Amino acid sequence: MAIQVRSGRDPESIRRLISAVTEAVVTSLNTPAPTVRVIVTEVPTTHWANGDVTLAEAAPRNGGQP
């Protein structure tokens, strides 16, 4: 599984994400956990855009939240 998230999340949050995705794949596909590969890529907020507005640009308008 390849997952992209905005950068800046704490390592514990990323670890919980990996565990939750692994469990979801194991449960839904009835496959052993060791066969599940999870790759999390953190993308800087300056490199992620919605509708031509980067998350970094949107943050001031959203109370500082990307």
Image: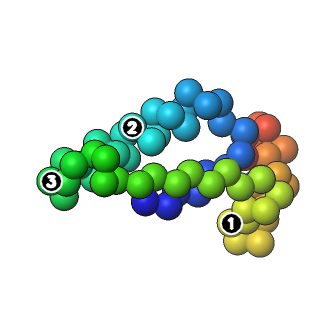
Q: Residue, x 31% and y 47% (percent of image)?
A: 34
Judged by depth in the image, the label closer to the viewer, 1 or 2, is 2
Question: Do tag 3 and tag 1 residues touch (Cβ < 8 Å)?
Answer: no
Q: Position of residue 56 (x, y in %)?
A: 82, 52
Cα gap from disc 3 to disc 2, whole angstroms: 16 Å
Residue 65 picture quarter:
top right
Q: Tell which circle, 3 or 1, labels the residue nearer the N-terminal end.
A: 3
Residue behind mark 2: 19
Q: Position of residue 59 (x, y in %)?
A: 79, 46
Badge 3 density bin: few <14, some 14–19, many ≥20, Cα 10 Å? few
Judged by depth in the image, the label closer to the viewer, 3 or 1, is 3
- Residue 24 image label: none
Residue 63 picture quarter:
top right
Badge 1 density bin: few <14, some 14–19, many ≥20, Cα 10 Å? few
Q: Residue, x 46% and y 40% (percent of image)?
A: 17
Cα gap from disc 1 to disc 2, whole angstroms: 28 Å
Q: Is residue 51 left or right of residue 35?
A: right
Question: Do tag 1 and tag 2 residues touch (Cβ < 8 Å)?
Answer: no
Question: Do tag 3 and tag 2 residues touch (Cβ < 8 Å)?
Answer: no
- Kind of residue indicated by mark 1: Asn
Residue behind mark 3: 30
- Dot 3: what SS? loop
- Residue 50 image label: 1
Cα gap from disc 3 to disc 1, whole angstroms: 35 Å
Vertical order, 56 against 51 (above or below): above
Let me know if residue 28 appears in the view.
no
